């Protein structure tokens, strides 16, 4: 199924409408949303558990696996977007600012083709 290319603001609006219709606001505290995002990320990781990189490539050719992955990605994103809304964070600004910070931390001239985690000495 194909959908329009919704903006983050529109998607947050759809999520908020879903919550409004069910009167679930009181359950959506920042910590509950952060925990829920982590739990859903665990479900996503479970799809990759015990699979080699080759197995994952094969699995991605399978529509059933891809549908499961798509649903878990959606679960994680929904909770994180909802968290940005509840916490008063602009997700576009947060991403752009973080990319700018990462660009300074990992200049492409120095880091092109190198994995940051392999040479990381500080946190
Ligand atoms: Mg899930």
Image (cartoon, rainbow, N blue to C red):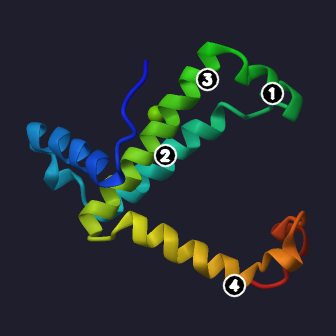
Q: CA distance from mark 2 to mark 4?
A: 32 Å
From the viewer's perspective, tell me whether residue 24 is left or right of residue 5: left
Q: Nearer the viewer, residue 12 or 37?
A: 12
Q: Secondary structure at mark 2?
A: helix
Front disc: 2 or 3? 3
From the viewer's perspective, tell me whether residue 60 is left or right of residue 54: left
Q: CA distance from mark 3 to mark 4?
A: 35 Å
Q: Nearer the viewer, residue 104 or 62?
A: 104
Q: Residue at x 86, y 64 (%)?
A: 115
Q: Earlier in the sequence, mark 3 or mark 4?
A: 3
The N terminus - image quarter: top left
Mark 2 closeness class: few <14, some 14–19, many ≥20 residues within 10 Å? some
Mark 1 closeness class: few <14, some 14–19, many ≥20 residues within 10 Å? few
Q: Dots 1 and 3: beta carbons under 8 Å?
A: no
Q: Residue at x 35, y 49 (%)?
A: 7
Front disc: 2 or 4? 4
Q: Earlier in the sequence, mark 1 or mark 3?
A: 1
From the viewer's perspective, tell me whether residue 66 is left or right of residue 33: right
Q: Is mark 3 within 8 Å of ligand 1?
A: no
Q: CA distance from mark 4 to mark 1?
A: 33 Å
Q: Dots 2 and 3: beta carbons under 8 Å?
A: no
Q: CA distance from mark 1 to mark 3?
A: 11 Å
Q: Which residue is mark 1?
A: 57
Residue 104 is tagged as: 4
As drawn, 97 above or below 29: below
Q: Which residue is mark 2?
A: 39
Q: Earlier in the sequence, mark 4 or mark 1?
A: 1
């Amino acid at each position: 199924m194909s959908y329009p290319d919704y903006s983050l603001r529109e998607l947050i609006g759809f999520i908020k409408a879903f919550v409004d219709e069910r009167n679930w606001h009181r359950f959506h505290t920042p910590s509950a949303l952060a925990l829920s995002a982590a739990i859903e990320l665990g479900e996503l990781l479970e799809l990759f558990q015990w699979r080699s990189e080759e197995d994952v490539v094969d699995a991605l050719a399978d529509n059933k696996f891809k549908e499961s992955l798509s649903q878990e990605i959606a679960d994680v994103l929904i909770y994180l977007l909802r968290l940005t809304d509840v916490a008063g964070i602009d997700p576009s600004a947060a991403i752009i600012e973080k990319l700018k910070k990462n660009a300074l931390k990992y200049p492409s001239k120095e880091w092109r083709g190198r994995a940051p985690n392999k040479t990381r000495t500080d946190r």
